[in-house]
Image: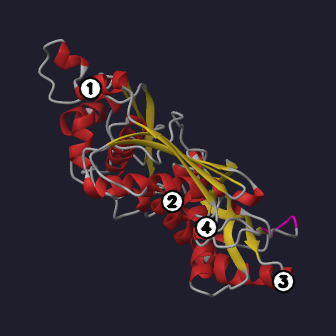
Amino acid sequence: MRKLFTSESVTEGHPDKLCDFISDSVLDCFFEQDPQARVACETVAGKGQILLTGEITSVAEVDLESVVRNAIKEVGYENETLDIDYKTCQVLINISKQSPDIAMGVDKSYEDKEGENVASEGAGDQGMMFGFATDETEDFMPMPIYLAHKLAKRLTDVRKQGILETIRPDGKVQVTVEYEDDKPVRIDTIVISTQHVEEADLETLKKDIKEKVIFEIVPKELLDEKTKYYINPTGRFVIGGPLGDSGLTGRKIIVDTYGGYSRHGGGAFSGKDPTKVDRSACYMARFVAKNVVANGYAKKCEIQLSYAIGVAKPVSILVDTFGTATIPEEQIIEKIENTFDLTPRGIIDTLDLRKPIYTKTTNYGHFGKPDLPWEQVIEF
């Protein structure tokens, strides 16, 4: 059976991703001074204005306005007439401390209060979290999002390296993969929209994007004469970033995960410290799912974990291998329970999450990057 599946990625200049990057930059700056910091900050970007809001409890002293401006500068925004200027934009700070009601449940778990011997803090929120892995790419990621991320990253690289001098930071990529019997066989469609300077020649830009972005990334055996290319299909993309559209932290949750190929619990990642299980438990679920596949127990695996706020142990664990398991799923669950500590403290300790690593995760997906701790392969 043949089917098409599409996934999307965006560049770091996309207004939502700019907000994610600012929020994760704030988190990293606090963790550099205070690994015990409680951080849940969100960013809103509009025309010439950035609002940083949320809750932070920490002994660290951080110049938040400088963090915001440096993050915008790193992305490459310095033109208020086209997108936003890191030097002149207005930065508003609206930060309070973590609610004592939430802190009470995180500091001491429900199990501890009930006298159970569970050496962990409570989960920082309720919810369900998913992790996924498949053997169809070297990074154990689905092919559509794997290629979309690589193309989006290449689009940024050719801009920052001066290979294509007419493009600007904002951009989006979409890849449609054709599957045959659940195996990727060819690329059906590639869509790339990139912000560009006013004087750019669009035909030259389209040719350059094909040659210096697409053909540099996509394996030629996946492309054929029927592959469709839509490059800046509207014909013009000069106004971009927060000037062209507002931005908000946490609005690209499908880009951040598996491109829609796997289920999603709904929680966003950026700007949250690892006591928030909607971030850290998703990392752990990916760690478990990847190791199920890497150890040969299945060709495809989805893990669901669910938590109650203030409770340490997950409420439920679900394993779905989509009929690809090489051993019974009950045995896989037993192996998981005997190997992985799925309490908030267990997750933080196992993955060493109280470090300033989070700006590395912001762009081009939180999964599939081999240097991140939840991407490591172990035997179990």
- The CA span between labels 4 and 3 is 23 Å
Q: Amino acid at mark 1?
A: Ala
| Mark 1, other Cα within 10 Å: few <14 / some 14–19 / many ≥20 | many
Nearest the eye: 339 or 196: 196
Magenta stretch: includes residue 116:
no
> Contact (CB < 8 A) between labels 2 and 3?
no
Classify 369 as above or below 57: below
Q: Earlier in the sequence, mark 1 or mark 2?
A: 2
Residue at 70%, 72% in the rendered image: 79
Colour scheme employed for the rendering of this structure: secondary structure
Callout 4 touching callout 3 (CB < 8 Å):
no
Q: Is residue 198 visible?
A: yes
Q: Which residue is mark 4?
A: 152
Tell me the distance, in whole angstroms, between the alpha carbons under discs 1 and 2: 34 Å
> How far across and how far down the image is residue 87, in percent?
59, 69
Picture layout, residue 101 above or below residue 379: above
| Residue that badge 1 annotates | 312
Residue 67 in percent (x, y) is at 46, 61
Circle 3 is placed at which residue position?
Answer: 199
Residue range of the region highlighted in magenta in the rendering = 229-234
Q: Secondary structure at mark 2?
A: helix
Labels 1, 3: front one: 3
Badge 2 is on which residue? 68
Type of amino acid under label 3 = Glu
Could you give the CA–CA distance between mark 4 and mark 2, rounded to whole angstroms? Answer: 23 Å
Q: Residue at x 67, y 85 (%)?
A: 164
